[in-house]
Image (spheres, rainbow, N blue to C red):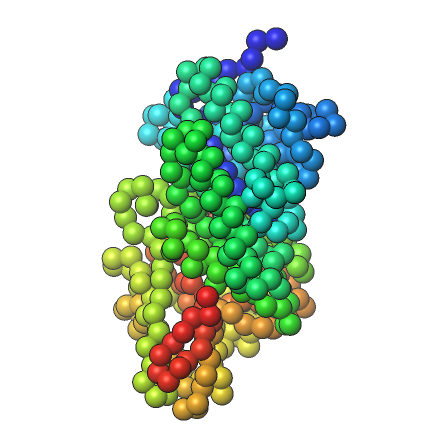
Amino acid sequence: MTAPRPTVTSLDILPVYGQSENRAIPDDLAAALDAATSEQAYYTFGMRDMSGNSVGPQGAGLAEIDAAHPARGFLSAARQGRVSPAYTFQFCRAAAWRDQENAASGVLIGDNGFGGRDIGEWSVQASSPLGRNQIHWLRESARLASEFGIRLNCPHVLLFQGTSAKDKPGSEYRSGFEAAHTGTLASVREILGQDPRLIVVVNGADVNSIGDRYDTPGVQYRIALEHGGILATWQRAFPISDRNIHPDGATQVLIGETCAWAAAEIEAGKEWNITYSVAREGRMVRVDFVLRPGETLIERHGLYEHFGGAATCANFGFEAEGGILEATVDWGGGSVTLTLASDDSSWLRFAHQFQDCSGFLDDLGRSMSAHRSTLFASESRASRFVQGEQLWRPLPGFRGTFVGDQFLPEF
């Protein structure tokens, strides 16, 4: 049988560290993604796992891919009927190329993750096959692309993983990530001679964060900055389709669209990452968020109207030991001034609440993360694929302690 060859001349491939929130799920929006990228989205066809089962776009899961069985070609990913943040990220890039009359470029989709897995399992040295499967997929895709005379690009590696690690110490999560990411970067350099840039969806808390550590959001924020990566968005700003943590298909598309927006801005030489700093003088604390030129802070009024309301997000989501008397926002800039109730406040948190919001649902049965703020950066844009929805730029959540007037982030 002749190996299927795509009509494009270049393909983007996206390695991902992803678990259940990033797993592809059936959704009617897949048809809209397909229509916007006709003959531009493919998957690597012909791989088998060690039991002889075919490996499709959804990957092999926790089965090991048979490295002795070669892939045979690239098949169209249209009509797979599934969406995920990673798929959407790539489909949006392909749609943008088509808008620019550059249909010769396409994307290669694949899912080499699994729900509830430790980040260290993406290391090629781990007993888990997740990391090895991903590198094998990359290697076989590169071999086929070379045979077909197609350029294979790997501009990004996506990190959207960590909610299952809600009780893992931050140092352990960081160690596992570094082991996995170091091996991935080395493999991409060996196979393609490229240095992909890390792009991060910082994981959110589930709807009940009482009693959980939740070090991972702060750790992922630091990981992105230390690796020169892109802080694309924060999962906590999106609805949850159940009383746990999982998004529905429309939300997965919105997350993926936001990732594509962030990557496009960075590739155009513009700033994207929102960072923060904290300065204290006695009871007065000023928090500055670094926004884009011309951007300000805004409040999304009513964001939690159906999810517990203002009581779950007092003082815009800021909390301090002993309480906060007043939170004042500079609506023309990027700062918030807090008046603390106590001279002895030893800690400060933002959008990092420990609370149970599992009883609050909207008319669609959705809930939202227990980590909350109504403050966002002002710039937004309409979703291309989810009618009536906007893409937003969430502010970074954090927590830390004071030593005198100096603020020390936990991570």
The quadrant of the rendering that contains the N terminus is top right
Q: Farthest residue toward the top?
A: 1
Which x, y percent locates residue 102?
Answer: 35, 25
Indicate the position of residue 5 as horizontal and vertical percent values. 50, 15
Q: Is residue 37 visible?
A: no
Residue at position x 42%, y 53% from top? 224
Going by the picture, which residue comes out furthest to the right? Answer: 51
Q: Quadrant of residue 287?
A: bottom left
Residue nearest the observer in this picture, 66 or 393: 66
Q: Nearer the viewer, residue 411 or 203?
A: 411
At a point 42% along the width and 26% down the height, the residue shown is: 152
Q: Does 67 appear above or below 319?
A: above
Residue 45, given in percent of the width and then of the height, sits at: 59, 22
**Front residue (pair 397, 297):** 397
* Residue 197 can be seen, yes or no: yes
The residue at 60%/28% (across/down) is: 79
Image mark count: 0
Q: Quadrant of residue 379?
A: bottom left
The image shows residue 398, relative to residue 174, as above or below, that is below
Residue ID at (49%, 41%): 183
In the image, residue 2 sits, relative to residue 107, either above or below, namely above
Q: Which residue occupies the extreme front position in the image?
A: 125
The image quadrant of residue 325 is bottom left
List x then y, in percent, for residue 314.
49, 77
Question: Considering depth in this image, is 247 or 323 the residue closer to the camera?
Answer: 323
Q: Is residue 248 left or right of residue 294?
A: right
